[in-house]
Image (cartoon, coloured by chain):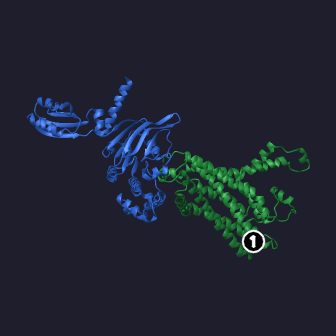
Amino acid sequence: MSDTVIEASGLTKRYGAATAVDGVSFTINRGEIFGLLGPNGAGKTTTILMMLGLTEVTDGTVRVMGYDPVREPLQVKRLVGYLPDTVGFYDHMTAADNLRYTAGLIGIPVAQRDARIASALDRVGLGDVRNKHVGNFSRGMRQRLGLAEIVMKEVSIAILDEPTSGLDPHATAELLDMIRSLKREGVAVLVSSHLLERVQSICDRVALFHAGRIALLGTVPELARQVLGGGYTVEVEADGGQALADRLAVVPGVRSVEQPAPGRYRLLAEGDMRPQAAAAVVNAGGQLRHLSVEAPSLDAIYNRYFQNQGTQNAA
Amino acid sequence: MRREGSPWRGLSVVFFRELFDHLTSARMLVLQLLVIVFGGMVVYFAAEQIRNTTAEDPFLFLRLFAPPGQTLLSFVTVLSILIPLIAIGLGFDSVNGEYNRRTMSRILAQPIYRDALLLGKFLAGLATITICLITLWLMVIGFGLLRLGIPPSTEELARCLMFLLVSIAYAGVWLALAMLFSIVFRSTATAALISLGVWLFLALLWPAFAQLVGEIIAPSDIRFAQLGLPTPDTVAWQQGLSRLSPGTLYGEAVLAMLSPEAQSLTNLLAQFQGRIMGAPLPFGQSVLSAWPQMVSLIAGTILLYVVGYVVFQRQEVRA
């Protein structure tokens, strides 16, 4: 597929006897936000470092826009922007000067340099503090400055390692918005995080890491169907008697119906079944009082998956 | 398997940024102040001494750097202590500082090789020291012109220039050593302490140590001892060992450049070519006799740099 920008197959990294990443394979497409999710120490950062050629690959291959990071690191680094976990800057220099240094390393022509720095800083909302020393910047501002560097570089792929860790909810929302705007420009974004809940909202597809392997790979609804057998929970509150539960249970796509209290029904479904559920209640002659849906959460998927793995291993 | 692209890409960007950083840093200001105060004081005393005593010395100007009979309070001694201090001060946090600021992975994610980063840092450090030394050197010469009232001869100027070059090579060794430790140790404090420790050991303890070890490897011969002469084997070992210290090499090279009439064992060659004892050596012969020391200093610099380079290339960049 010509739209593939990153292709990893059988990627493995060993430190002596310990295996950090064990035969990981995935592809990332143009204009896609791909989540590399999993607990700390699951091998996410090591995978990223191998994609950038910052650490040696023990086994397997990785191609970034067709280039091999081991053999052609400069080509790869020209196309990829990287925001490391807790990014650092030179504290005694201003935000603009920090970017000017990187611009020099990237090789942006001097004539364009200042314009590109200014527009990148404006875009991440740091235009007002461009001549302030980075030493006084908050964590959120540093992350945004790191993002400005990627914007300035005009990359095809952005790799963000734990971009939201340590940020307050407001700063997180802002940062996620900026990541979405990168996607709109056709940039493929790879986000790694251990905060499943926060990142889930922006990811098109996710890979769940566990102990150096990809345990699950796909879109969140796909994974929900696979692991939770549905994943959507539709809450219905209606008057209609016992027959209503049976009517709801036969709606196509509904896996099971629970009745936590009289007149309240909880449906486990494969998708957002609110219209169908409402129609079922009305057709059964019931009175609909409340209807809500809860999308499947990655946390639930992750926990359920490893519970299942645990019981399988124990058996 | 060839790497694609030039390893020097980005070298000048790194070089100029580091140079700018060094020159504007408070650390550099303190070090330079130290050199100017100490150097100025010593040179002033030397000039006073020269005005009072020597009138018909053919190398009056060189006495400014190395006053005769004075070893402790000469400009050369001050430099041989301060150069390692400056070099270590500039180099001890060059690589691990980037890790600690967490800028390393961000910089190395840009399209440059690690070669450019390391070499840029080394050259910037060396350039900073060179600028510092040249300033100092010009100041001393200017002061000499004013205070002594005579211009240096061409030969004196050539000798002073060689002295400057040897000093830069000497600084290179210590800079490469400090950078090596900054690559090996993740903590800047550890790197600084170990660099200073190595320097103190080599400068203060090693000369005595070399005497001792030389005596153990090749014990003094009783036949020579009875004549009151040192045993040649012992002396050779002692000298060889003491030359492992860059300070010794620097001292010998400087002695050859600045004290043309001084005797040293490496002057045997000159004696075979008809040297009269006590007469000053011509410039060419002085350079020749200091040549091995100068080459050793440069070789030491390259060796330490290469070890650091290899370690740095293999390091995993996580921060």
Residue A286 visible to an observer of this rendering: no
- Picture coordinates of residue A219, whole percent (x, y): 31, 40
Which of these two is toward me, B314 or B208? B314
| Quadrant occupied by the C terminus of chain A | top left
The blue-tinted chain is A
How many numbered marks are there? 1
- Tell me the kind of residue under disc 1: Thr
The subunit carrying tag 1 is: B
- Picture coordinates of residue B143, whole percent (x, y): 69, 72
| Residue drawn at the location 81% of the way across and 62% of the way down | B262
Residue A283 is left or right of residue A174, and the answer is: left
Which quadrant of the structure image shows residue A35? top left
Which of these two is toward me, B266 or A116? A116
At mark 1, the secondary structure is helix
- Picture coordinates of residue B265, whole percent (x, y): 82, 55
Q: Looking at the image, which residue sits at the far left?
A: A285
Q: Colour of chain B?
A: green
Residue B1 is left or right of residue B250, and the answer is: left
Vertical arrangement, residue B232 with respect to residue B87, above or below:
above
Residue B280 visible to an observer of this rendering: yes
Q: Looking at the image, which residue sits at the far top?
A: A315
Local packing at callout 1 (Cα closer than 10 Å; few below 14, some 14-19, many 20+) is few
Residue B211 is left or right of residue B301, and the answer is: right
- Picture coordinates of residue A56, whole percent (x, y): 51, 42
The residue labelled by disc 1 is: B154
| Quadrant occupied by the N terminus of chain A | top left
